[in-house]
Image: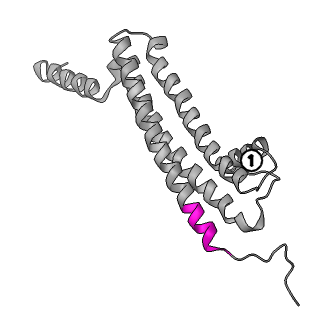
Amino acid sequence: MRPSTEYFYIISLEEIVWGGILMAITMGAHGFGMIMVLRINNFFNRKIGKRKGFGVAILPVMLASCLILLVHLSEVLIWSAFFLWKDAFPNQSVAYYYSLNAYTTLGSNLLLPINLRLLGGMLSAAGLLTFAWSTGILITLAQKFQQRVLPDHSEKATMERLAEHSGKQSEHPGK
């Protein structure tokens, strides 16, 4: 008995090569995008200076979040343009919809043509890697935000308070 063509699939070298190229382009674009996000963030932080307050402190994180989103959407555009070029989908909207859903690992009811199926998984892997990288950037910026808003709760300030408190206890051992 011959297997159904629906389940019969052979990975091609062409898929692997295109997947590697697209993965490299995605990671390169993401690296460039993250450097730009950090540069813009540093420029913005220099402009706001030492101003205090929650609103001022959260602005760099909000700006960085929006810029990171634009970087991710641009990376999805790279993959969707490739799928459109390979006639995998009828138009850019459908190609972008599929690419965004695969990139975020959400998935969709759309399928790539059989000769490009492996690229769906590679696109999801690219999304996972770039989201992890973006998360690292946002964690760094969130820590700076917290240090700015809660300067008395930084590790250094806590250690200084503990040292000051233990010094007072040694001056007044009975108390």
On the picture, is 146 further left or further right than 174?
Answer: right
Q: Position of residue 109 (x, y in %)?
A: 83, 53
Q: Does the magenta portion include 160?
A: no
The answer to whether residue 96 is above or below residue 142 is below
On the picture, is 85 further left or further right than 142?
Answer: right
Q: Residue 120: which quarter of the image?
A: bottom right
At label 1, counting other C-alpha atoms closer than 10 Å, the crowd grade (few under 14, some 14-19, many 20 or more) is many
Q: In this rendering, does residue 109 appear at all?
A: yes
The answer to whether residue 40 is above or below residue 53 is below
Magenta residues, dominant SS class: helix
The answer to whether residue 124 is above or below residue 2 is above
- The single residue placed furthest to the bottom in the displayed view is 1
- Please, what secondary structure does the residue beneath circle 1 have? helix
The magenta segment: 11-20
Q: Position of residue 93 (x, y in %)?
A: 77, 41
Q: Residue at x 43, y 32 (%)?
A: 36
Q: In this rendering, does residue 150 appear at all?
A: no
The answer to whether residue 52 is above or below residue 116 is above
Q: Position of residue 142 (x, y in %)?
A: 44, 29
Q: Residue at x 36, y 13 (%)?
A: 47
Q: Residue at x 19, y 21 (%)?
A: 164
**Which residue is at the front of the view, 153 or 15?**
15
Question: Which residue corresponds to mark 1?
Answer: 95
Q: Amino acid at mark 1?
A: Ala
Q: Residue at x 71, y 47 (%)?
A: 101
- The single residue placed furthest to the left in the displayed view is 171
**Which residue is at the front of the view, 14 or 168?**
14
Q: Does the magenta portion include 17?
A: yes
Q: Residue 19: which quarter of the image?
A: bottom right
* Count of number-bearing discs: 1
On the picture, is 92 further left or further right than 167?
Answer: right
